[in-house]
Image (cartoon, rainbow, N blue to C red):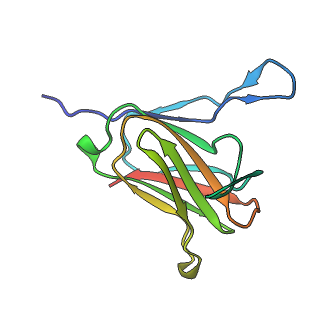
Amino acid sequence: MGKKMNRWMIGAMAVVLGSATAAVAVPTRLVTQLNQPMSLQGMSGGTVASDCGNISAQPSQQLQLTDEFAETSGYLRFVVEGAGDLTLLIEGPAGRFCVLSDLAMSKGPEAVGYWLPGTYNIYVGDRGAQSYPYNLSIWSE
């Protein structure tokens, strides 16, 4: 029997401009294997105060995992790097997870684990209510 492939898609949510009915969507990228880290950029923070810092009203990134990632590839790791007091909020089928920066170690938020199939909304926030460029790396171990 052949090896089961993990399939996931990353894309941005559609953004509605003003009162217009048209939406602008970023193309979704389909990845069948994750042989090296995937790197995504954006701006941290936002106007919504949450228990995981200030976040944007829409997810910073969205991940669609179609197979249970742990079955064939082990853990999936999310690491955020950038200035400020970054937070990482992941909402998905298994619940809601908030990870804070470790300022004492000068380390950004990091989430590692097994991930169930489904849609994950990923927010990169800031506890200082600021906004900075960030880099989100995702890879398997």
Image location (x, y in percent) of residue 94 = 41, 43
Residue furthest to the right in view is 19
- The answer to whether residue 1 is left or right of residue 97 is left
- Left-right relation of 97 to 36: right
Q: Is residue 87 above or below residue 67?
A: below
Residue 20 % position (x, y):
85, 20
Spot the residue most to the left.
Answer: 1
Q: Residue furthest top?
A: 21
- In the rendered image, the vertical position of residue 46 relative to residue 2, given as above or below: below
Whether 76 is drawn above or below 4: the answer is below
| 130 sits to left or right of 109 | right
Which residue in the rendered view is the most extreme toward the bottom? 104
Q: Residue at x 74, y 23 (%)?
A: 23
**Where does residue 129 sit, x and y in percent of width and height?**
76, 62
Residue 39 or residue 83, whichever sits in front: 83
Residue at 61% over, 49% down: 123
Which residue lies at the image location 57% right of the left edge and 69% below the top edge?
A: 101
For residue 118, above or below residue 55: above
Q: In the rendered image, which quarter contains the N terminus?
A: top left
Quadrant assignment, res 27 = top right
Q: Horizontal and vertical percent for residue 116?
A: 36, 39
